[in-house]
Amino acid sequence: MRQCFFLLVTIVLAVSCKNGRQSAQSSDSESTDSCTVEADAYRSPVTIHIDNKILPLYDTLTLNNLIESVRYIPLESSDSALIDAVNVRKIGDVYCCVASSFLNSMVKLFDSNGRYIRDVFRIGRARDEISNSSTFRINASGREIIANSISTSKYVFFNLDSLTYRTVYNDKFDIFPFHPLGKGHYVALTRNNRPVNGSTITETYDSLPHLMFYDSDLNITGTAGDGAKPWRDLETTVIPRLYSDILESGEGVIYRYVDGDTVYTVDADERMVPAIILDIPNKLKPTIRQAEIDPASRKDQMIYVQYFQLSRDYVFIEYRYGGVNYSGIWSRDNGQLLFLNTFSYGINPILISVDSYCTQLNVGYLNRRDNVIITPINASYLVGTIPGLKADDNPVIIEITLRSGM
């Protein structure tokens, strides 16, 4: 699935230009604590309109429009700390950095100032070890990092407070990549409700649950949204494709069924609550059948939503139209399109211009309870911006806080 791929592929994009203003470790008049978590009060779903003629207010994010502040955290570059970070998460005052190489799974911890703390997992076949090709999940509320060796039924949990491991084996049934909901609960897509190679689904169902819930030992505790129809992803299917997706968002997830117009939030109460209504003209909205059989030329005439995320005040959506990838930001209050960007590859990339440089960064993870983007960037792009930084140093973590109420 796409979300596993994102954890394992290098995705720092950058281009050089000269805009913005000079700064050292932070921009704006004062630095902000990017770990502030606020309650996600109930909000009515917002309607997001997407067509082939939409125009944004901005094509670059700056301190004069959506950006409130920028903070830089250079990661220690000692021999034991070196990492090519592709994904960064913050758990309290600890940064968890995942390496980009698929063949060298690595997770390293750094403190709030970028000082190296320790590696998390060991490569091997012992009980508490993982293979060199693994996927990772972050349970921020439970302060756990979870590794699953690909194509195995072993899940290794590491606790940041006790520095201990626990290993769960589950060979009774397949578990789709799961996400934490808080309070020791997890959620995943239904295993049989997924793309499969080949022309048929070997097991026949009239309908399936949308989501499956698990406890901390990965025992099934329940389901939600019964009535999803099984669908296929044929070997002949060309990109872009339609697929169901579930994405972590703070203590909870956001979920969209393969051809659904509604994006839901799901929390520890295990309820699907509408958050986004996608408004795409029928002539531009592909059906599941069209996604299966249309040639690339026909697909270029349709809008394929690829990826979506929520912050406290914004909706981030990535889509493809006319053979071009677009990444946009909409207001979560009124659905206004604020920013639109074209790109070649990445995760909801944004183009920012601050501190005498202009760069394209990926929005790999958002918490819908704040407006903070946390992402790594190659040190070479900040040489001269951060005193003493060298081009071959470890990546720098950037915390971008977006303004409220836009």
Image (spheres, grey):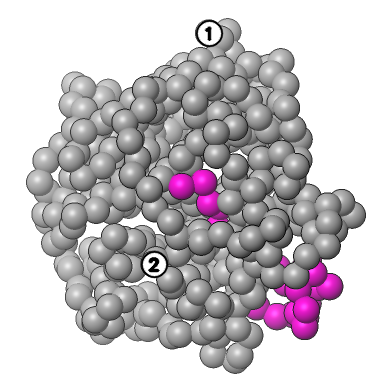
Q: CA distance from mark 2 to mark 1?
A: 44 Å
Q: Quadrant of the C terminus?
A: top right
Callout 1 crowding tier (Cα within 10 Å): few <14, some 14–19, many ≥20: few
Q: Amino acid at mark 2?
A: Gly
By secondary structure, the bulk of the magenta-drawn segment is best described as loop
Q: Is residue 10 magenta?
A: no
Residue 194 visible in the shown view = no
Q: Is residue 75 above or below residue 65?
A: below
The x and y percentages for residue 235 are 47, 36
Specify whether residue 388 is painted magenta.
yes
- Report the magenta residues as a range: 370-394
Q: Is residue 32 left or right of residue 394?
A: left
As drawn, which residue projects farthest toward the bottom? 79
- Circle 2 sits in a helix, a strand or a loop, which is it? loop
Q: Earlier in the sequence, mark 2 or mark 1?
A: 2
**Which three-letter amino acid code belongs to the residue tagged 1?**
Asn
Residue beneath disc 2: 92
Which residue is painted at 61% across and 67% down in the image? Answer: 397
Using a 10 Å C-alpha cutoff, classify the residue at mark 2 as few (fewer than 14 neighbours), some (14 to 19) or many (20 or more).
some
Q: Does 250 appear above or below 211? A: below
Frontmost residue, 226 versus 247: 247
Please report the residue visible at 33 percent of the width from the left and 36 percent of the height from the top: 41
Q: Kindly identify the residue that appears in the image at 71 percent across and 39 percent down.
A: 65
Residue 161, how many percent across, how many down?
27, 78
- Please determine whether, in this image, residue 354 is positioned above or below residue 213: below
The x, y position of residue 274, in whole percent, is 33, 25
Residue named by callout 1: 282
- In the rendered image, which quarter is residue 164 located in? bottom left
